[in-house]
Image (tube, rainbow, N blue to C red):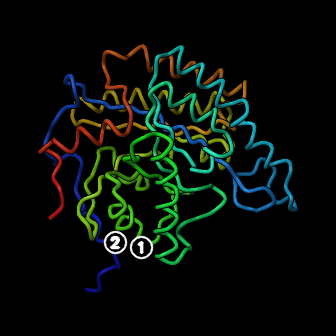
Amino acid sequence: MTKLTTHGRYDYSAITNRPDYSWPGGKRLALYIGLNLEHFAFGERLGAELAPGGPQPDILNYAWRDYGNRVGAWRMRDMFDALDMPVSVLANSAMYDYAPDLMAAYSARGDEVVGHGRTNAERQSVLPEADEANLIAEATEVLTQANGTPPKGWLSPWIAESHATPDLLKAAGYGYTLNWAMDDQPVWMRTKHGPLLSIPYPQEANDIPSIVARKDGAQAFADMVRDNFDEMLEQSVHQPLVMGIALHPYLVGQPFRLRALRGVLQHICSHRDDIWLTQAGDIFDYCLSCDAIPKPD
């Protein structure tokens, strides 16, 4: 029988047939916020669109996205402070040049900074391997200089990978990736340079697919996150799980969406004693020492 082409990064495994373990404190559900802080080139086409198809320079969509950095992300910082919620900041390295005070404000909270490419105005998947490696190196250097330590994790702009991306990330010193949305538990992946951890990053509890693609309303998105949380909290009795919430300030930082989002985050925080409210990097650190999460051969 002819076999399909495969990636070879991990083997199939049913979540119901894996070794059991718990998160710190005996918790069964780990939850983290993935806050995307992104910057876009002016007059180029790549980027989410409020009104699609306009000619360049596309003032409407560029300014709409820029609202997230100028207003939305600051309102969200105040909300996270009020709720005492940690955040994993998924940062384009261009943000340190464009909005350094915004990056400093999140770093001052103690939030983790995750590599998220140079800018969301480009995709690394279309680059020759040497150019992709250079992109990763450039972004990593900026984040390392700004924070004093290299980032542990990476999310590609647009979740775009070449066949070599996991190998390049591991070679560049990364410990985990958020690119692969194939599981509700962390999974060790194979690379040419050793294991790379895949930490679940949502493509459903994510404001871009919900709000931009499906045109969900503010409350519909909040309800989806709430139902996802409630269901996973129940499911976690049987298996330890990870839930990420992917947010973009130009979307959920809009006042009417922020109000709905605040409500569901308050609901999540009311279960603070039942969950491990954490950052993606802390999940990686825990998995490093957890023998129940098998590394690939």
Front residue of 162/147: it is 147
Q: In this view, does 297 lie above or below 74?
A: below
Amino acid type at image mark 2: His
Q: In which quarter of the image is residue 165?
A: bottom left
Q: Position of residue 246 (x, y in %)?
A: 52, 40
Within-10-Å neighbours for mark 2: few <14, some 14–19, many 20+: few
Q: Upstream in the sequence, badge 1 or badge 2? A: 2
The residue shown at (33%, 44%) is 184
- Image quarter where the C terminus lies is bottom left
Amino acid type at image mark 1: His
- Image quarter where the N terminus lies is bottom left
Front residue of 131/124: it is 131
Task: Point out the frontmost of discs 1 and 2.
Answer: 1
Q: Where is residue 68 in the image (x, y as percent from the top left)?
A: 70, 36
The reply to whether dot 1 and dot 2 touch (C-beta < 8 Å) is yes
Q: Is mark 1 on a helix, strand or loop?
A: loop
Label 1 sits on residue = 163
Q: Position of residue 262 (x, y in %)?
A: 58, 20
The residue shown at (35%, 54%) is 174
Label 2 sits on residue = 7
- Residue, far bottom: 2
Residue 47 circle label: none
Left or right of 144, for residue 276: left
